[in-house]
Image: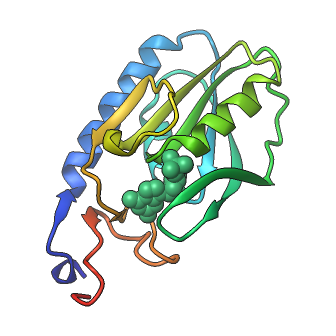
Amino acid sequence: MKTQFDKVLLEEGEIRARVSELAKAISADYQGMDPLLVCVLKGAVFFMADLVREITVPCELDFMAVSSYGSATDSSGVVRILKDLDANIEGRHVIIIEDIIDTGLTLSYLSKNLRARNPASVEVCALLTKPERRKADISCKYVGFEVPDTFVVGYGLDFNEDYRNLRFIAAMPEEGSR
Ligand code: 5GP
């Protein structure tokens, strides 16, 4: 599988080590707070599953699915909620778990939407960020890695639903070289 990707950006071991560090930081910051981790489907599923197993304080999970209108590789900032939370988050400490922050438009919408429900706090934990592409001013307390301005796949991240099951994260090969 790996041979078709000429640019592996993050190996499995590096991801595992960083996820463990993020879990340590969250565990230290959220003692006695019973945080609710909100996984944004589908890309953040693997990240959330690995992260939560390293968190050492009691926490709960919930899931949201959103679709942002736009092309396969570019989001428009107009977001539709496909699956809403099961939990009432009023008074809860919420951590949004995202796969990647690109323009930040999806997250900006999502955190505004969740803040309107009167939680005690809302923070963001994103595995990847592409700071060069940012259009929305958002704060992300926990970040795994910065990646360059390139479309990445693997460890939950897809291209037209492919490649989510890769154990590593790679730059998508240019059209024509695939
Ligand atoms: P944003 O609204 O920040 O521009 O985009 C956020 C969403 O777009 C991410 O949650 C992810 O689903 C998708 N996305 C952005 N960049 C990438 C990328 O490089 N690879 C993949 N697979 N998805 C991306």
Number of marks in picture: 0
171 lies above or below 79: below
* The image quarter in which residue 70 lies: bottom right
The N terminus - image quarter: bottom left
Which residue occupies the extreme top position in the image?
Answer: 32
Q: Is residue 157 visible?
A: no
Q: Is residue 134 visible?
A: yes
* The image quarter in which residue 26 lies: top left
In front of the other: 94 or 68: 68
Residue 170 shown left or right of residue 70 in the figure: left
Residue 103 x, y percent position in the rendering: 47, 45
Residue 155 x, y percent position in the rendering: 38, 60
For image coordinates 43% across by 46% down, the residue present is: 50
* The image quarter in which residue 96 lies: top right
Residue 54 x, y percent position in the rendering: 41, 35
132 lies above or below 119: below
Residue 151 x, y percent position in the rendering: 34, 63
The C terminus - image quarter: bottom left
For image coordinates 58% across by 60% down, the residue present is: 42
For image coordinates 76% across by 54% down, the residue present is: 80
Residue 125 shown left or right of residue 87 in the figure: left
Colouring of the image:
rainbow
For image coordinates 47% across by 33% down, the residue present is: 125
